[in-house]
């Protein structure tokens, strides 16, 4: 047994609503363009052949209710309100039934994005890491257990900036359902507890600035909030 040369950071812990327990986050997968109206506002189309993904480090996690500095390296930091799905069992090449059973719970999430750096990536056919894998950009509210809730269906999903509504849709607008995403993603990964999937954002994304208060919700789940403070 060798000794680590620095103190190993613990996995980020996501609160479970109404419980003392927490859900450790090991990996974060994000679905691209899962709402047709958002794909259109980004100048693209939904790929109806298959969903596609990018990832964020688990250490990009930020608990809902936090105040964080406006990030470096952008002048166009955007909000994206999303449904997060936490995996609770091992799932590899999952059937639809296995996919449904693999869901541990649901939460409101923000996929905060350096839109200018993401656009650089698109323009130069480079990866999106600087646009998407931003410190404090995976904001997640407390989890609701699927065993307490069932499957998601047509709930409202919404986001406000300083109280003004910017995103308003329903989960029925998702192109790929939670089960379809798990079936597809598990063709490529051995999904396991600790895996969190952000399922894409509806239309209405836009910039935020230092001093803004972002709030959002999905009916039935704990609401989310984030305050941006002055840059470091
Ligand atoms: Mn997103």
Image (tube, rainbow, N blue to C red):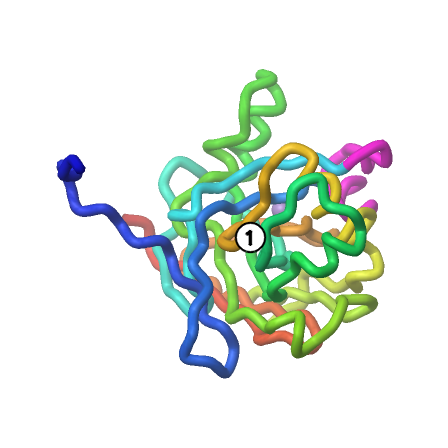
Point out residue 29 in the picture as x, y percentages from the top left corner.
57, 44
* Residue in view at x 60 percent, y 64 percent: 104
Point out residue 225 in the picture as x, y percentages from the top left corner.
50, 68
In the figure, 66 relative to 43: above or below? below
Q: Which one is nearer the viewer's eye here, 44 or 31?
A: 31
Q: Secondary structure at mark 1?
A: strand
Determine crowd level at label 1: few under 14, some 14-19, many 20+ residues with C-alpha closer than 10 A.
Answer: many
Q: Which residue is mark 1?
A: 196
Is residue 126 highlighted in magenta?
no
Q: Is residue 140 left or right of residue 181?
A: left
Point out residue 148 in the picture as x, y percentages from the top left corner.
66, 78
Position of the N terminus by quadrant: top left
Point out residue 176 in the picture as x, y percentages from the top left corner.
80, 47
Q: Is residue 151 left or right of residue 127?
A: right
**Residue 68 visible (yes or no):** yes
Q: Which one is nearer the viewer's eye here, 72 or 197?
A: 197
Q: Is residue 162 left or right of residue 48?
A: left
Farthest residue, direction top: 124
Magenta stretch: give its range. 33-50
Q: Which one is nearer the viewer's eye here, 215 or 166?
A: 215
In the figure, 23 relative to 133: above or below? below
Q: Main secondary structure of the magenta part?
A: loop
* Residue in view at x 42 percent, y 74 percent: 21
Indicate the quadrant where residue 221 lies.
bottom right
**Residue 178 visible (yes or no):** no
Q: Is residue 82 left or right of residue 65?
A: right
């Amino acid at each position: 047994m060798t000794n680590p040369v620095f103190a190993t950071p613990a996995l980020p812990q996501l609160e479970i609503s109404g419980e003392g327990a927490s859900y450790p986050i090991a990996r974060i997968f994000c679905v691209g363009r899962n709402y047709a109206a958002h794909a259109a506002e980004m100048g693209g189309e939904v790929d109806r052949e298959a969903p596609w993904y990018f990832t964020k480090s688990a250490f990009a996690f930020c608990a809902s209710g936090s105040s964080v500095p406006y990030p470096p390296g952008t002048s166009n930091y955007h909000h994206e309100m999303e449904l997060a799905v936490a995996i609770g069992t091992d799932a590899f090449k999952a059937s639809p039934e296995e996919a449904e059973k693999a869901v541990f719970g649901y939460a409101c999430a923000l996929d905060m994005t350096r839109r200018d750096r993401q656009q650089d990536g698109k323009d130069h056919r480079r990866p999106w890491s600087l646009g998407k894998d931003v410190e404090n950009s995976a904001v997640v509210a407390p989890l609701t257990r699927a065993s307490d809730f069932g499957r998601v269906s047509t709930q409202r999903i919404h986001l406000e900036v300083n109280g003004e509504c910017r995103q308003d849709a329903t989960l029925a607008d998702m192109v790929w359902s939670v089960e379809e995403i798990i079936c597809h993603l598990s063709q490529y990964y051995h999904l396991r507890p600790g895996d969190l999937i952000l399922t894409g954002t509806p239309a209405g994304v836009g910039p935020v600035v230092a001093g803004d208060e972002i709030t959002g919700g999905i009916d039935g789940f704990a609401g989310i909030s984030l305050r941006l403070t002055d840059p470091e």
